[in-house]
Amino acid sequence: QLQLQESGPGLVKPSETLSLTCTVSGGSIYSSRYYWGWIRQPPGKGLEWIGNIYYRGSTYYNPSLKSRLTVSVDTSKNQFSLRLSSVTAADTAVYYCARRTMGAPDAFDVWGQGTMVTVSS
Amino acid sequence: DIQLTQSPSFLSASVGDRVTITCRASQGISSYLAWYQQKPGKAPKLLVYAASTLQSGVPSRFSGSGSGAEFTLTISSLQPEDFATYYCQQLNSYPYTFGQGTKLEIK
């Protein structure tokens, strides 16, 4: 059974870089059927799609974050990562990694449990 | 960006009720719409994809319909475990966007 697990610091200082890793277990990240994505949710608010990456490395970013965002993949470790630079309090959120399946089901069908990241000095 | 507007934002209902949530897109998205259920402190769970296809393992009391720019999620007979927040998401084009959510509460 495929599982995703986010990891990274829970506290980041303003203006610094937020770095998270998603480890995929129970399946391979090296597949043409899937994209791998990041979604976040500020406390008490709705969901925001951050970006996707394909196993070959092609990326798709939310324009609202694009200038600060880097998503990368390491197929040898079965992981993909997010880096968000110059963070502010507005970046405080639960960050989820998820699998986006192409075809059936055509959606984010497997999610990590999420990790809370607080931006504060 | 494609905007998704859900209505209502809050819904109070009783066990056994039939409820419908609507999701309207700012432009046509064919059938590239998914519905998720989220409970407090948990990750979203996929319920419906391609507007009307039930994800494996999801109870048949859930159903989705629509295409183009207007979509609905219906729960035919509410069960206690259905009280949660529901989100629609469009996957027609980047950037993917979500509706603002519909919080379903017990009356």
Image: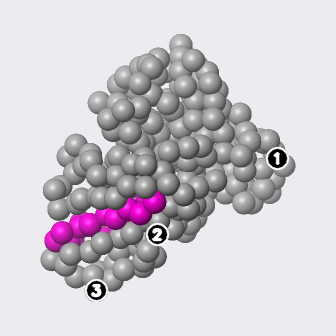
Q: Quadrant of residue A69?
A: top right
Residue lying furthest top in this view? A76
Q: What's the mark number on residue B6?
A: 2
Q: Locate residue B73: give its quadrant.
A: bottom left
Near mark 1 (Cα within 10 A), the count class, few <14, some 14-19 or many ≥20, is some
Report the residue at 41% width, 32% height from top. A102
Q: Amino acid at mark 2?
A: Gln
- Can residue B82 be found in the magenta stretch? yes
Q: Which mark is residue A86?
A: 1
Looking at the picture, which amino acid does disc 1 mark? Ser
User: What residue sits 41% from the left and 63% below the top?
Assistant: B70
Chain where mark 2 sits? B
- Any part of residue A117 in sight: yes
Answer above or below: position of B29 versus A27. Answer: below
Q: CA distance from mark 3 to mark 2?
A: 20 Å
Marked residue chain, label 3: B
Q: Please report the bounds of the magenta region as a residue range.
A: B69-88
Label 3 crowd bin: few (<14), some (14–19), many (20+), radius 10 Å = few
Residue that mark 3 sits on = B107
Does A99 sit above or below residue A50? above
